[in-house]
Amino acid sequence: MENPVSVNENGINLKPEKMEKEKLYHCIFKNKAMLVFKDSQDVLNCYEIEQEDLVEKIRKTCNGDDLEKILEDYLSEQT
């Protein structure tokens, strides 16, 4: 299956029609992590992460479950 979020030299390409609802997608562009998901009402949500250590952890993951765990761990460390 084609990834609905991709990156090339011109920027980030999104294909919302290929996204599953409530599934988190990610990519790295210019040393920033971009998190994207389509909610239950088909609204596209995008978040940009610039924190270097978190971006590096995200860069090393290739799996949505791992990504969610990384974010959960990061949030728990912040409290």
Image (cartoon, helix red, strand yellow):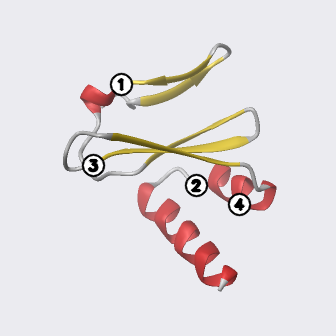
**Is disc 3 placed on a helix, strand or loop?**
loop
Query: Which label sits in the foreground, 1 or 3?
Result: 3
Q: Quadrant of the C terminus?
A: bottom right
Residue bearing the label numbered 2: 61
Residue 24 image position (x, y, % from top left): 40, 51
The image shows a total of numbered marks equal to 4
Q: Earlier in the sequence, mark 2 or mark 1?
A: 1
Q: Nearer the viewer, residue 40 or 15?
A: 40
Q: Earlier in the sequence, mark 2 or mark 4?
A: 4
Q: Badge 1: how crowded within 10 Å, few (<14), some, or many (20+)?
A: few
Label 2 to label 4: alpha-carbon separation: 11 Å
- Residue type at mark 1 is Lys
Label 1 to label 3: alpha-carbon separation: 14 Å
Residue 40 image position (x, y, % from top left): 20, 50
**Is disc 4 placed on a helix, strand or loop?**
helix
Residue bearing the label numbered 1: 15
**Is disc 1 placed on a helix, strand or loop?**
loop
Q: Quadrant of the N terminus?
A: top left
Q: Earlier in the sequence, mark 4 or mark 1?
A: 1
Q: What label sits on residue 46 in the rendered view?
A: none
Label 2 to label 1: alpha-carbon separation: 21 Å
Q: Earlier in the sequence, mark 3 or mark 2?
A: 3
Q: Badge 3: how crowded within 10 Å, few (<14), some, or many (20+)?
A: some
Residue at (46% x, 54% y) in the render:
63
